[in-house]
Amino acid sequence: MASSKIKFELPFHITKRTDIVAWKAWLVRGGAIVIAFILTAIVSTILTKGDMGGFFKEMFVGTMGTANKALKFLNGWVMLLMIGLALVPAFKMKFWNIGAEGQTLMGALASVVVIKEWGKVLPEEVLIILMLLFSIIFGAIWGLIPAIFKAIWNTNETLFTLMMNYIAIQLVLFAINIWAPNGSGTIGILKYGSFSDAFGMNYIINIVLVTIVTAILFIYIKYSKHGYEINVVGESVNTAKYIGINVKSVIIRTMVLSGALCGLAGWFLVGGSPTPTINSTLVAGRGFTAILVAWLGQLNPIIMLGSAFLVVFMQTGAAQVASTYHIGSSSAFGSIVVGLFFVIVIAAEFLVNYNVVFKIHKHKKVAKTADSLATFGNKVEKEETKKEDIITEEQFEEELESIGTRYFERTITKSKNFEGNDTFTPQKEKPPVEKTAENEEKEDK
Amino acid sequence: MKKKVFVLLVVVALIAALCATFVACNKKGNNADDTIKLDPMTNIDNVTVDKTGGVVKSSIKFGLITLHDSSSTYDKNFIDAATAVCAEMGVALRVESGIEESNACYDKAVELAEAGFDIVFADSFGHEPFMVQAAKAYPNVQFCHATGTTGRIANVSNFQTAFANIYEGRYLAGIAAGMKLNEMINNNTITAAQAVMGYVGAYPYEEVVSGLTSFYLGAKSVCPQVTMKTTFTNSWFDPTAEANSALALINAGCALISQHADSMGAPSTCESKGVPNVTYNVSTKTACPNTYLAGCKINWGTYFKYIIECVQYGKDIPDDWTGGFATGAVETLELGSAVADGTAAAIAAAKAQFEAGTLKVFDCSKFTVSGLTLTEYVANVISDENFEADTNVVLKSGNTTYIAESTYRSAPYFGLTIDGISPLNA
C-alpha cells in the first residue's frame, strides 16, 4: 500500500558539504539574520497593529537608549556570554554539559553562603575574594561529579548534568528556607558583598572581567596544549588514547574548568549585582540559552560575542516592544519573536552545511548497473579534473567509490519498493568506536 | 600529581588564612535599632484626597511590575485593575510582566523611573527590597508595593506599601465552603467526620497562613465540625505542583479545596474530580462551571485610583495603607451554581457585621492554639533579618478580644497554626 506506482522525484537533491568558503558561509549567516529580523519585524507589526517604525525604534532605543539601559544590556550580554564560555571546553570535548544552570546556581549559592556566614565580620575586600573562591569551588564540584562518573563508569553526561540542575535548585530552596524561617521564600537584598558599583557605574566590573575571560579562553582553546588535548578527545577518544593522552584526566580536568567558569558566573550574578540576592530562578534559564549561544558561536569565544549579543538583544528588544504596545501582560509575544528569529538563523546553517543541487538531466529509473555507475563516475571525473587539474588513479577510485555510495544510498532510500537493501547498502566509513565500559576492560587486560 | 597537591594545599592555606582573619576584624557593627514601636495605623480603608490645591500634575504615567503574566490569576487581578483605572483616568500605563524577585525588579523599576514614570507599582512579596532600593535612587518617583511589610519602617518617603483586609473576604468565602459542606452532610454525601477541607498554599508564611486560617474560621462559623489539611508548593505559580497538591488533598479525603497559589492548577483538578472549589483573585466560574463555589479578591483599582489622585493633587501617599469593604478594596466574587441554598444571604449578613465592627475574624474566643485560648500574640510586625516577634497585636473591642490583623501594618502577620488545621503530611 505504501508503495504507490507513481514515482515522484524532487527536482533537486541535497548533498553534505564541508568545503564552503568562509566568506560565503558568513554571507549566508548574515543574510539569514537580516531576513530573520525583517520577518520578526513583520510579525510584530501585525501583532502591534501596524507600526513597523515603532518596532525598530523600540528594539534599538528600548534596549540601549540610556546609559543605565546600555549598562544593563551590556551586563545581560556578558552574563549570558560568560555561561556560554563555560560550556565551550566541555562541548569541544563532546561532553554535553547541559548542567550550566545548576553549576552557575551553585556558584551563586556559594557566594551567598559566604555573605550570610561572614558578611558581618569580614572587610568587604576579603569577603568578595572569599566569595570568588567559594563560587569557583562550588561550581567546579558541580561539574566534577558528572565528570567522574563519565570518566570512570561512562555514564550519560547529558542526563547526569541535567539532573544536577534540579538538585542545585532544591539546594537553593533548602538554603532559602533556612535563611527565611518565616517561609516566605525570599531573603531580600544582602547588605554585603556587592562589587557592582565601580567608577559610578553598575556592572562595570562584570563587563571588564568577562571580556578578559573571553580572551583567555580563546587562547586556551586555540593555542594551549590543554586546548589541543580537548580537541583530540572530542574528535576521537581512540586517537587520543593512541597518542598517549590520559582521556580520563582530560575529561575530569575540562569539566572542572567548565564548572568553575559557571561558578564564576554565579559570583558575577550575586556580587556583581547592585542588589545581591539569590532565589531558584536567579540564573533565569541562561544555563540553557547558553547552549544556543555556544553553538551559534561555533564554540569560538570571539564569534560567541556576536551570538550572545543577538540572543540578549532579541530578548530585551522583544520584551521592550511587548510592554510598549500593551502586550506586556502576556509573555507569549517575546517568546514568539525570539523563537521565530532563531529558527530562521539556525535553519540557515543548513545552507552552510548542505549543498542543494538542482537536477540537470532526467533519470527516472534507478541506476542499478555498473555501466550507469561508470557513466556517472566519468562525469564526476570531468568535474573533479576541472577543479584540481590532476587526479591520481587512487584518488579517483576513492572518489568514485564515495560518490557511488552516496548515489546508491540516495536511490535506495528513494525507491520505496526496493527490498533487501542490506545486501546492497555499501559500507560507510565506520565511526570511531565509542569508549564503553567493556572496551575499557578489554584494554586494561 | 605533586603539582596538583601543591595547588590544593595553597588553596586550603589561603582559605584558612582568610578564616583566621574573621576573628580579628569586626568592623561591621550591628544594624538598626529595635526601639521602634508601632501603633495601629490610621490609613485603613481611607481614600479621600485633599483636592483643595487643584491638579498640580495632569499627565501621569503609571508603571506596573508583575511577577508573572496574566496567565497567573494573581497578576491578572492587578493587570486588569490597572488597565481599567488607567483607561478611566486617562493615565498612561505600562505593564512589565515576568519580572523576577531579583535584581531584575530593581533594574525594571529604575528603567521606568528613568523613562519618566510617576508611579511604579510592584505586585509580588519578594519585589519589596528591590523597590526600596530603587526608591532611594529616584526620590521624585513614587514606588508602591503590594503585600510589602516595611512601608512604615523603611524611612524612605517615596516608598509605600499597601494591602487589604482580604482575611475578611476569605472568611466570607469560607462561609460558602462551610455551607456547601453542611449541604453535603445533609445529603449524606459525606459524614460529619468527613467534613475535611484541603488548602493549597504557595509559601507557608504569614500572608498565606493568615488567609487560610480566616478561610477556615469562616467555614467553621457555619460548620463547626470542619477540619482542614494544608500543603504548600513553595512557588507562587506552578500549575503542575498545584494540580498535584490538590490531587493529593483529594486523595487524602478532602471534600472541598481552596487555594492561595496563582495558577489554574488546583481549580482545574477540582473540576475534573468533581470536588467543590473556593478560589482567590479571579472567578473560575467559566472554566470550572460545575465545581466553582465562591471566592474573594482585592480590588486593586481602589488603591491605584487613590495613589494616582495623590500624585495628581501633589499630596503624599501614606507609607502604608489597608483597604477594606467600604471603599470596595475587598470584594467577594460571584457565586457559582454549585453553592448551597442561602449562601448569598449568609455572606451578606456576615459582611454587614464586619462593616458594623461587630464581627472579628480572629476573635480569640473562636479558636485555640494547642488547646489554649490566646490572650496575647506577639507578632513580627517590624520585619527584620531575625524575624523577631516585637508587637502584641491583640486588641479589645467591647467584650471581644481579637487579633487585629492588618492593623499595625497592611501586610498580614498572623502566623499561627490553630487547632483544626494540620499539614497534609503530618
Image (cartoon, helix red, strand yellow):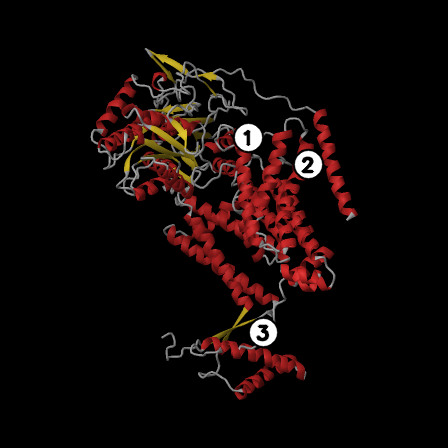
Q: CA distance from mark 3 to mark 2?
A: 55 Å
Of labels 3 and 1, the one closer to you: 3
Q: CA distance from mark 2 to mark 1?
A: 22 Å
Which residue occupies the extreme front position in the image?
A445
Q: Which residue is mark 2?
A: A129
Q: Of residues A370 and B103, which is closer to you in this image?
A: A370
**Is A419 left or right of A306, judged from the image as shown?**
left
Task: Indicate whether B79 appears above or below B314.
Answer: below
Q: Secondary structure at mark 1?
A: helix
Q: Residue at x 26, y 34 (%)?
A: B334
Q: Look at label 2 and name its amino acid.
A: Ile
Q: CA distance from mark 3 to mark 1?
A: 60 Å
Q: Of residues A351 and A44, which is closer to you in this image?
A: A351
Which residue occupies the extreme bottom position in the image?
A371
Q: Is residue B203 visible?
A: yes
Image location of residue B55, percent across then percent down:
37, 27
Image location of residue A331, percent across then percent down:
42, 46
Q: Secondary structure at mark 3?
A: loop
Residues at marks 2 and 1 on the same chain = yes
Q: Look at label 1 and name its amino acid.
A: Trp
Q: Which residue is mark 3?
A: A428
Disc sitting over residue A179 in the figure: 1
The answer to whether the residue labelled 2 contacts the one labelled 1, judged by CB atoms less than 8 Å apart, is no
**Is B133 left or right of B81, judged from the image as shown?**
right
Look at the image and tell me in which quarter the N terminus of chain A lies.
bottom left
